[in-house]
Image (cartoon, helix red, strand yellow):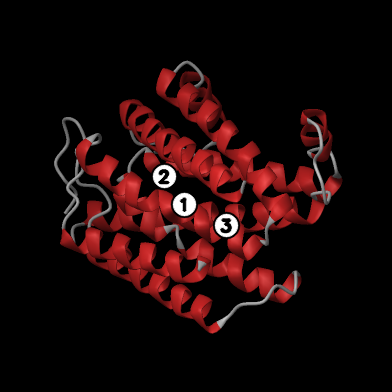
Amino acid sequence: MSSETARLRAKTWTCATVVVLSNVLGNFFLKRGMPADLPTPLAYIAALFQPWAALGVVLLITWMLSRMTLLSWADLSYVLPVTSIGYVLVALEGKLFLHEEISLKRWAGIVLIMAGVALVGSATAVQTARRGEEPAR
Amino acid sequence: MKLLLLAIIVAATAAGEVLAAMGMRRHGEIRDFRPGALRRAASVLTRNRFVIGYVAAMAVSFFAFMRLLTISNLSYAVPVTAVTYALETVMAKYVLKEHVNWLRWAGAALVICGVALVSL
């Protein structure tokens, strides 16, 4: 592995960690701060100012910015599977903190998602197509 | 209602992410993470029309997702939105011209099957 490839991979995994954690925690706090019903459009806006929902929104803005940063060098078809590890964390979080049920079928799904993440994350290049640049493989 | 919200989320997210990838690719790799450099990059990106399109699409997706959260569990709402993976991987190959080799297709297929199992 060349030093450029190693640099890109380390940078990618660091940024992907921020992407995943900000997304998982952002969704969690948003759900926690969300009222049972949103009858009018104004209720949507008002809900965003509930403390837990506001924290969720801040984290989701962090998610959006870190994902954009990641896409400045990494392929979308690489970023998609690698950041899907968040789905596993969301399911675990739902079970641990919101007491939502996870069936055997859902656990099987979680295993498949993790296998997909491992396959793409470890066995393919971070970027394959950049205008005026050589692929980093 | 759930399916309609899901369709809106999938379409807006897929379009938004492809626009983000196009905009950020045009901008180039962010290498300097000092606050001043990030502020300058943010300032440049606010004038990038692909990024503006991304933010608009994600806002649509976000409000549809908020609505979905009020009528379903978090462990249903989040995984089913991963249906976008199939659409976005196809768009990555044909719109963004990425080299999606068999390992990436296999990885995407595993994730999609996983999502289907998680959501059924």
**Amino acid marked by disc 3:** Val
Residue identifier under label 3: B78
Cα distance between the residues tagged 1 and 3: 21 Å
- Foreground residue among B1 and B67: B1
User: How many labels, in total?
Assistant: 3
Residue that appears at 50% across and 68% down: B120
Q: Are marks 2 and 1 in contact (CB under 8 Å)?
A: yes
Q: Quadrant of residue B107?
A: bottom left
Tell me which label, 2 or 1, sits earlier in the chain: 1
- Foreground residue among B20 and B109: B109
Give neighbour class at mark 3: few <14, some 14-19, many 20+ (Cα, 10 Å): many
Cα distance between the residues tagged 2 and 1: 6 Å
Give neighbour class at mark 2: few <14, some 14-19, many 20+ (Cα, 10 Å): many
Residue that appears at 16% across and 61% down: B102
Where residue A35 appears, as percent x and y from the top left, is 83, 49
- Relative to A88, residue B100 above or below: above
Residue that appears at 19% across and 31% down: A131
Where residue A109 appears, as percent x and y from the top left, is 45, 74
**Amino acid marked by disc 2:** Leu
Q: Secondary structure at mark 3?
A: helix
Chain where mark 2 sits: A
Residue that appears at 73% across and 54% down: A31
**Amino acid marked by disc 1:** Cys
Residue identifier under label 2: A70
Task: Say whether residue B72 is left or right of residue B59.
Answer: right
Q: Quadrant of residue A121?
A: bottom left
Chain where mark 1 sits: A
* Front tag of 2 and 3: 3
